[in-house]
Image (cartoon, rainbow, N blue to C red):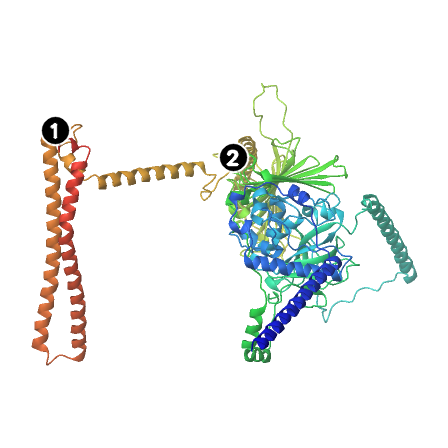
Amino acid sequence: MDKIEEATTREEEEGEEEQGEQETDVESKVEELKAELDAAIPPIVVPISDVSAQIPKFDLSEFPDSYKENSPKEKLVLENAENFRRQYVHLFRDRKPLFLNPLNECGIEKFVCTTMRPTLLKFKELYHWQGCAEFVSDYITMMPLDPPCDLPTTFYSPTTILKQQKGNCFDFSNLLCLFLLGAGYDAYVVSGYAIKEVCLYDESREICPLLKKKEEVKVEPPKPEPKKYAVRPPRDLRSKFIIKMEERRKKQEADEEEKQRIEEEEKIKEAEKPPPDPLYGLRVHSWIVVRGGKREVPEDFFIEPFTGVAYSPSSSKFLGIESVWNHLNYWANMQECSNGCKDLSFELTDTTKWEYMFIGSKEPGLEIPDLEDEIDDFDDLDEEGKDDEKHLDMPASWVKRIEISERDYDSRCPQGKKTILYKKAKLEKYAPYLLKEGLIERLTVFNNNELTDLQRVEERFANREDKLKQRKEEGGIITEEFVEGRPRSLCEHTFKAKSPNPESERVMIFYHSARVDGLSKREETPAEMKEYYENREDFLYFRHIIFGKRVKKLAPAVAEGPPRPILRISEYFHRNKDILANADIAERIFILSEDKIQLSFHRENENITMSTREFFKPPNAEEKTGNLQWTPDMTATFQIDTHASPSKHLAVYDQLVELIQLEQKSIQLVRASEEEVREILLDRQREEMAHELSISVYDTERNEKAKKHRKELEIQAQEEKLRRQEMEMDYLAPFLAQIGNPDKITKTQAFKLKEDCMADLKQRLIDKANLIQLRFEKETGELHRRQQDYQQKQVTMTKEDEEEYFNFCSEAMFRIHILELRLNRHKQMAPHKYMQLESRLRGDQRLSGFF
């Protein structure tokens, strides 16, 4: 047996040795395989010194733990990303590495998808992609990649980027993408290549977006329907050969002009063409792709984060794509980019074109399954659920919640101002309330690329008390635009910068619906004034005044000279269909220089001319008390209807009297218009000197008056709260008030205060016990009464009455039980409260010296 055991033991030892040798061989083979893989697929090695030099020093105590360490799930994702990177490098050795797990501000590797946290802020402008793109491009200062052909080694969180207000293209794209995802867009961050001007945010060869003309949709007027009995046009008796030769000559001239124009444009383009870039196609850049489907987006498009401008995927500014990602997954591009991005397909579910990292993540597309597919999915629900559980999904974002205050959102640009240079233009942006005149945007347009030959200046304002919205100056002409709300409803004012005084060339446009007289436009020159009206009850729509030159007098000069003499006032009226055309005045002219009044009436549809009447004013026409000396030869009438009876002399006389009164009224209106122009100009001078800005009552940060009032109310409320607390805690206050609140308390007063305070507490405890006892007796008496009533009427009571009685008994017993517990508790606590008050009185500083 011993020999058998020894043999068995020897065999086992030999088996263990063989097994150990096999395991050693396997481990050695695995190590050899790893070495071969490392040699074939080398990892990305970043010098530690370079990385540490690129990471700014942050106070790590300011960041939460998610910034400074990785969770187990994040570590697993990083391992998966490293495996994905190795396979990618093995398959595409000639391509640059993917942007997968850069370092954050704390020096910790983080997967790029987890750096994105979709956010929807409270500002309504950020609900649309235009507002999001404009905000990001204005709020963040662009920092170029260094070197421009390599991916950045660091990738900060959006909260840090918003705090610093500066970042590279990847920071811009990440921040813009999370805003777009929060607003419901199907957006992705793109890592790829672009031209030099896009990567360096060089807009000097681009036209300013404010100068681009919107495409006007030409609507062809409807063709008139041919009439059955229309008159045939006359025959064209011209020579067809001559017409043909003339058309050929015009066409040749047009072709020659078009050829010259194209040649000039080509010369200009060649002169403005940027020099060749030695790094063309190698400059790394990041931007946004928005896929169609969600938020009524019809087709895919790009958004350049530096400018906030949308581009088509076929744009020549973007040269290639390496990868795209969002908060759900990461996709590597498998398509050829030799023709840029115009031939790329963004169907991310196509595995022949895009290689995704996470199998279990849902691709955000618009999918509408058929009914049969839904039934099949329902049958295989359990199996699919088991398969999904095996897949690695995306961990939660490690970024803190993104918040932007009202003041930061209003400031928009760093330090509240930003300047952008465009082709022959310079755009300056300012935050609201930054400048005292309320300027928020200034566009300066030049005639040359060197920005030295000034053409015009356009300024936009906000929050002005004078309601000024925009000012434009070009060629010495200033145009000011106002929003509604001014005292005289001025909408637009155009005048010469060298002659801003009254009685000079100017054009004023008004909000006619806000004026009583319906004035919509006033044009003025030193010699005339034109006024346009709308929707007047007297049907007046135009008044034209002609002025004469002032007569020079030798009288001493005064501040304001005599008014300009009026030579002629012409008034035009729309048709009043309530009266006859021959009696409806179309034109009324007061010729003051010749003492004449001319009337022209509307014409009927079948007439080709109109009736007229002319008056010659008598010498004493302006005298109010005098009688007019009138004779029939002082009027001349042309009546289109020869069969109508002529007007009587009395009617003509009354009309003359009325016209003379209307003439005086028109003169007063003209003088009132001149005075209104002077008042408007004086108001504008005072407003430009004051520069007052309006602050909303809802703006609690800038409204100093409301802020001061709010602070005063808070102080008063705090003082009242402290006073009430002191009154509630000071149990001697009511008894001290009875003796006049003396500064010093005598021994007799101290003993009396103690006795009164103790007696008062004792009485309140007794009163509370009596109150509880009274309620207890009341409830028991009512229950006893209902029980007696039930015993008397038990035989005749219905089932509903019995249920009501039992419910009442149950509730009454519950209340009685509560009152009994409350009374017992009060009896137990009363002595403790009494003794506690006595100890407090003995320890009170005001009474402790006497006890």
- Badge 1 is on which residue? 746
- Tell me if residue 636 can be seen: no
**Residue 432 on image: x %, y %:** 55, 40
State the SS at label 2: loop
Q: Residue 692 — which label?
A: 2
Image point (15%, 48%), residue name: 832
Q: Is residue 375 above or below residue 252?
A: below
Image point (9%, 31%), residue name: 748
Amino acid found under the numbered disc labelled 2: Glu
User: Which marked residue is nearer to the observer: mark 1 or mark 2?
Assistant: 1
Residue 367, located in which quarter of the rendered image?
bottom right
Q: Nearer the viewer, residue 834 or 757?
A: 834
**Residue 400 on image: x %, y %:** 52, 51
Q: CA distance from mark 1 to mark 2?
A: 65 Å
Label located before the other in sequence (1 or 2):
2
Q: Which quadrant does the N terminus fall into? A: bottom right
Q: Residue 625 — which label?
A: none
Image point (74%, 41%), residue name: 424
**Residue 48 on image: x %, y %:** 67, 45
Q: Nearer the viewer, residue 674 or 272?
A: 272
Amino acid found under the numbered disc labelled 1: Thr
